[in-house]
Amino acid sequence: MEPTDNKTISAELLRYLKQENLTISFFADKSGINSGTLSRIINGQQTISVSSLDLITKAMNLEKGYFYSLYATESCSLSSLDWRRLGPFIQSCAELGKLQIVDQVVSLMMDSLSYASHLFDCAEHLFEEGYKDAAVIIYRKVAESERYQHAERLALCQYRIFTCSLTKNQEHNLECALQLESYILRLGEAEQLDALKDLANLFLSLRKWTKARYYAKLMGHVSKNLYEQKVNRKSQRKKTIEPAKPLFGYILYANLMLGAISAEDADYEKALYYVSSYEDLSWVVETDEESEQTKKQFKDWAIGNKYLYQLMSGNTDVLEEYVDYVSVRKNEVLMALFKIVQAANIYRFDIDKYLERFKNIIMDQLERSENVGSYTTQFFDDRFANFLTDVGLYYLRRNNIHNGVRYILDSLAVSYKINNTANIVRCCSTIEKIRSKIDYSDLQKYAAFMKEVYDQDEEKVSVTVVNC
């Protein structure tokens, strides 16, 4: 059955009853809708709720959402807007993935700004339930219509859009971060710390050290002020707004990030100073279960990072202890290997046995590309791509050309997926330098990959031209 052009839902239902030779009473029993209600719906005397529409659709043996396009058209004139009907309708459209209808309904509703608050709350609900594509549509509409440019709601819309829009494409993620920056300080206290953490993490993954340091420091400053206020208000009745995680954890995380950034600058003395800042937790007043777990996590990270920064500063005596430490922490093995390979390339020591020992973990990550531990996808993918190149360079330095080129080619594939241009250039320049030493079969793989990249880029250009 196909909806008839220029017809209403009530007309479609009446046509069905006549076609099937059914009485209103019979169909009412079949659908579970009161016969009087059904009669009023057919006669246009009563608006239909989305729950009744779903019952009617099911009784007509049609898929759920079959009449949603008609329903949107009938329900969205400014004179007939009713949140009690449209709120559940938007929810149902989101659940069914009917995003075009969500866009249509929300656009019409935003012609009346009185619905902005309802729609924002609806987007928050959808966001929490995981219907992020639908939520982003609403956040964008609310943000576009927001009159007060410094409104907290506008900033929160932009933050939600940011979190929902991140992909494996690093260039795209940079654009998302730059879009959010001008709104970050307009967020409420509870969301601001998470937004600062997310921005710092993203800029860290993009190797934008200055921006990463700026937002890590800002997160530390804001969280310290809020924590002092919380402690000082402990005996007072006024309740402080709490972020998603224990407040003191943001102070510790800021120091963790600042240590990592210092290490990237090869300032290992400062990196070790920051380790001491999240190793000593005597000042933390919380003793609940979640807080104790957070403290335990940071103490554990402090142990591992002490080994790491000592190794990166040239103290190879701690290598075996560091490997023993991470080997029983599955989510830390790859991150540790990233740095061990870097150190081996800098200080020219042998790590063949460790690469062989953890080879299966490396290959599993290459095949599955899974999230690892608490690391963000963007951060980990970037580090993994560069790690594969570093392993390749390690083997090339040891004159193991075949192994070296294999890792370089793997890195090239990963880097292309996440649009890591810098590492793509690094891989290609390495291969070109040693082209004369590479096996014919490996050269063929390289040529085939570059042809695939070229063909895909040409296709993207063609699509762009057509769309223009």
Image (cartoon, rainbow, N blue to C red):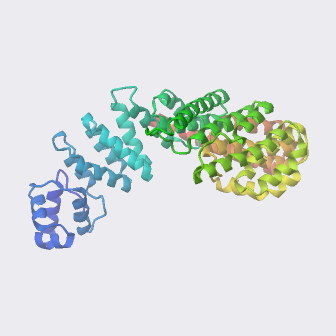
Judged left or right of residue 112, residue 334 is right
Residue 4 visible from this viewpoint: yes
Q: Percent position (x, y) of residue 416?
A: 65, 42
Residue shown at 56%/31% (left/top)?
225
Which of the image's four quarters has the N terminus?
bottom left
Q: Percent position (x, y) of residue 2?
A: 24, 60
Q: Percent position (x, y) of residue 278?
A: 69, 40
Q: For this rendering, which residue is in front, 184 or 87?
A: 184
Judged left or right of residue 304, residue 319 is right
Residue shown at 74%/37% (left/top)?
276
Please count the marks in the image.
0
Q: Percent position (x, y) of residue 251?
A: 62, 37
Q: For this rendering, which residue is in front, 205 or 456?
A: 205
Residue 451 visible from this viewpoint: no
Judged left or right of residue 416, residue 154 is left
Q: For this rendering, which residue is in front, 393 or 276?
A: 276
In the displayed orientation, state which residue is furthest to the front.
235
On screen, residue 3 above or below 72: below
Judged left or right of residue 225, residue 12 is left
On screen, residue 153 above or below 360: above
> Which image quadrant for residue 302?
top right
Which of the image's four quarters has the C terminus?
top left
> Which image quadrant for residue 62?
bottom left
